[in-house]
Amino acid sequence: MKIRVFLLNPLFYIFLLIIILRYIGTNHGFPYIYNVDEPTLVKTTLDLRFSPWIDRFDWPHFNYYFHFIFYWIFIKFRALIQLVGLDGSIKSVFPIIWDDPFIFYVVSRIINTTLSIVSVIPVFYITKGIYSKKTAIITAISYLLFPYLASHSRYAIQDSAMMAWLAFYYWFLYRYWNSKRIKDLLLSAVFIGLATGVKYNAVLFSSAIPILLFLQMKTRSLPEMLDYIKRNIVAGILVIGVFLLVCPSVIYYFELFWSNNPGVGIFWQLQANLVKYTLIETPYRAFLDYLDILKGTGILLSIGFILYPIFYRRLNITKENKIFMIVFWLISVGYFFYATRIVLSGPRFYLPIYPLIAMIGAFIYFELSKFKYYKYISNFYIAILFGVVVFQTIAFTQESTVNLAYFKYQELSKTNDVYIRGEDIERLNLVNNLGLRKLRPTTQLAQGNYIIGSRPLKLENAELVDTIEKMEGYNRLGPTIYIYRHN
């Protein structure tokens, strides 16, 4: 009976449709890769077939081992297909299954998409516990439709996975905050250890454990203080233990890990690779980054997140829930200003606070639900988010402008010299080792030569070139591509 009621509920089909949309387009770019971080994950994971040890620590290693489990299952499944003689018929329908190494990029993208979708579970249950089931449902739908989360998870990179493990950390810490069960505290420590095993900056969020444990104390008596210290020590040991368990190469290559070797040691990652903006530049950078978060989360919940400290005292929720949310609000804001000073940061650096933006900003839904036209307002907002994600999905299913530029290069280079310029197409060339000729300041162009670039060409003598084609990127991935011919 329960299953029947579940299947008759329109919400089930709404969630199902959103989830299907999130998986469409995970094979984008085929057969080329143009994200510079994807090859690191896929190639390092594939190398685990030959050795379980990893000798670089620019990123922790848990995600490599986690993805390797699914690579191994996929390889065995593919071998089974060949063993029973079905490879010929399946290959004719799904040739990508035997297209190495690209198929492993698809596998990793599917894993990342799954993790980001599963992270809605903590968002739902925390929001339900703090506000209401109605607020939790609309917040969960909004979270699954966060535009940047929906697009970013379609790449084989680390940030979506870290965010997912952090979401479960938030959940179990919330459960501990309400239940005081030591089991929930230990599980929260496990998940922050896993998140740190994906990216080091996840450990910054572990600061919530000692803060919340301190706020739980009532008398500040000596026995209570000793219990506070004991719980922090146990949680800390478990975090470190889980991190070492999922990143065993830290012990095997300890000296290499604890070094400043370029591209290898943790100090290189934490120092040389994290160049910071000046204090003068930071406010403007923070403004731009917040605009990225607004776009990435669909505006409404991000505004709610910012307004939370103003309204939280008036909210009809328990004092304990108010404290829990304000603690994580402060940690999120602190993390934002930490990340916004890093030159190499970008929208992906803020994914760890996306679940918190959804949960904390959800008070807007909670308050709006008291108004007469709440249903129409919330449905209209969800419809806008849904439209954005549908548009994104269509773009992921189209040939990217960068791929089209390469196909044009192949066509034109049969009879003419062709040169490339611009970061995007040069990245495609570098990552896929295509051997395309780069336009340099010293390049001597001759009549009939072509230039393919991802930014407009500016020459002192503009009459020397003709723009013969312009590929717009408004309905597909990639920038606008310009194709010029030298007269």
Image (tube, helix red, strand yellow):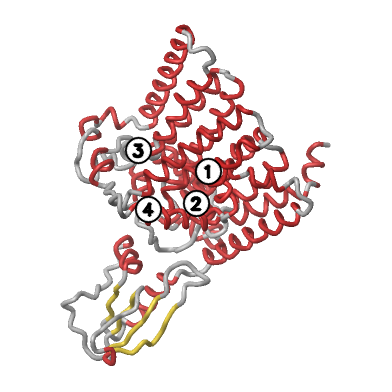
Kind of residue sitting beneath label 3: Pro
Along the line of sight, the residue nearer the viewer: 308 or 479: 308
Q: Estimate the spatial distance between the alpha carbons at disc 1 and disc 4, rounded to whole Å.
A: 33 Å
Dot placed on the residue nearer the N-terminal end, 1 or 2: 1
Kind of residue sitting beneath label 1: Leu
Q: Quadrant of the C terminus?
A: bottom left
Q: Residue at x 20, y 36 (%)?
A: 259
Q: Are marks 3 and 4 in contact (CB under 8 Å)?
A: no
Q: Estimate the spatial distance between the alpha carbons at disc 3 and disc 2, rounded to whole Å.
A: 19 Å
- Structural crowding at the residue carrying mark 1, measured as other residues with C-alpha within 10 Å and reported as few (<14), some (14–19) or many (≥20): some
Dot placed on the residue nearer the N-terminal end, 1 or 4: 1
Q: Is residue 289 above or below residue 254?
A: below
Q: Estimate the spatial distance between the alpha carbons at disc 1 and disc 3, rounded to whole Å.
A: 18 Å
Q: Are marks 1 and 4 in contact (CB under 8 Å)?
A: no
Is residue 23 shown left or right of residue 267?
right
Q: Furthest residue to the right?
A: 1
Where residue 403 appears, x then y in whole percent?
Answer: 41, 70
Is residue 142 shown left or right of residue 34?
right
Q: Which residue is mark 1?
A: 115
Q: Which residue is mark 3?
A: 60
Dot placed on the residue nearer the N-terminal end, 1 or 3: 3
Where residue 110 appears, x then y in whole percent?
Answer: 51, 50
Dot placed on the residue nearer the N-terminal end, 2 or 4: 2
Kind of residue sitting beneath label 4: Pro
Along the line of sight, the residue nearer the viewer: 203 or 177: 177
Q: Secondary structure at mark 4?
A: helix
Q: Furthest residue to the left?
A: 442
Q: Residue at x 65, y 34 (%)?
A: 130
